[in-house]
Image: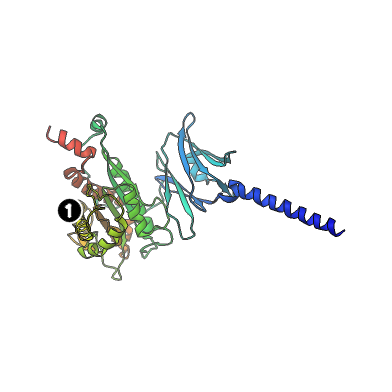
Amino acid sequence: MYNHGLFMIRRYIFIALSVIIFSLSTPLFANTVILRKLVVHNTPHQLSATFYLSSSTQYRTFSLHTPNRFIVDLKNVKTVQQLHFPDAAKSILNGFRYATHRDGVFRMVFGLNSSIKPKTRVLSIDSHHQVRLQIIFPKTRHASLPLLPPPVREKIHIKKAIINDADFDQDNKNQRRIIIVIDPGHGGKDPGAAGINGTKEKNIVLSISEILQRDINRQPGYHAELTRTSDYYLTLRQRLAIARQDKADMFVAIHADKWRNTQANGFSVFALSQRGATSEAARWLARRENKSELMGGVQLQDQSHLLKSVLINLSQSATIRDSLEIGTNVLRCVKPIAHLHHNTVEQAAFVVLKSPDIPSLLIETGFLSNPREEYKLSNLEFQHQLAGAIMQGIYQYFSKYPPRGTWVNYWRKHHAHS
């Protein structure tokens, strides 16, 4: 009896251990990444789908046609809940399905109504240690916008690009576009300033930024990206990292102001102050210590610490000088349509402006604490005018000083005087 009972116990232990060993040997147990949730944001200009993952994983994307489909493959991913898109997504998607293949690949197939080109990017880990994979579906025809106050009377006539699409198509020979990264301030848990009528800064600046992005992308030889495409939070350092990841030629942060005096008003432009640049040099040096070069190809690895500091300070001084000139152009273009809080570019130690080799501006579009400016900034027509003026200021600078290797620089050399 005793021996039989011992035999049965050993048998159960053996079976249990076999199950555990088998489980541990399968990728599903050891390496599975959990797809926890899907968050969809629908704006007038695009649809964004953010997938929250328990950890990072390998993925690939590709497109198929006839019919139009966009496919995302994720390695060793398992979902713990049903994934679905809201009805509002039907303007872009005509279907969505997903399944796990035998090789452990989790495949999502997005049926597209038109031949758009979705963009995919991995956002940094959030406060819950989740990795976010974001897919952005641009809209070819913008959905109707929410009702806004009646149009304001101020109008601005933006000059058309001096370069046309035919020129771009003919001469686009291994030349890159000028990259502008636009940063709509705040977002998510950080609403920013709030107007007396409840207008939130994070919503106003996202709308203006989307219009600015579209205006810039209409210019041949230019391409604009947004740091955030819907209502979510990014740290200031994450915003800088996105600009560097996109290899930006310029970074522009869009904000709206607030002050206890409700009469305060006007449009402002900020560049980095020398005080801010000096305090940032040590941080930048530490992060770049093992990198091979700054923009422009200056090798740092074999240089002394003092020389590295001098090179970084020289780079940042030149960047601030460029930022001030771009800011001056923007103020000149905005002046016909909006009151200027200051007639010159101000300087302050904003963290978001501290890239030592990317010209950067922070634009305060107006004061939400001023009821009249809150009204204007909520007005879609005024947003278009403001974005158009900002674009024109940026365009004027880069038309005069295009970065090397860009198509605008190529065109300027070969066609500007022909």
Residue extending furthest toward the front? 3
- Residue marked by disc 1: 325
Residue extending furthest toward the bottom? 260
As drawn, is 378 to the left or to the right of 104? left
Whether residue 171 appears in this view of the structure is yes
Of 75 and 332, the residue lying toward us: 75
Q: Secondary structure at mark 1?
A: helix
Whether residue 380 appears in this view of the structure is no
Q: Give the vertical position of 306 relative to 51 (above or below).
A: below
Q: Quadrant of residue 200?
A: bottom left
Of 316 and 326, the residue lying toward us: 316
Of 334 and 353, the residue lying toward us: 353
Residue extending furthest toward the right? 1
As drawn, is 284 to the left or to the right of 192? left
Question: What percent of the width, then of the height, locates residue 303?
Answer: 22, 55
Residue extending furthest toward the left? 417
Of 333 and 145, the residue lying toward us: 333
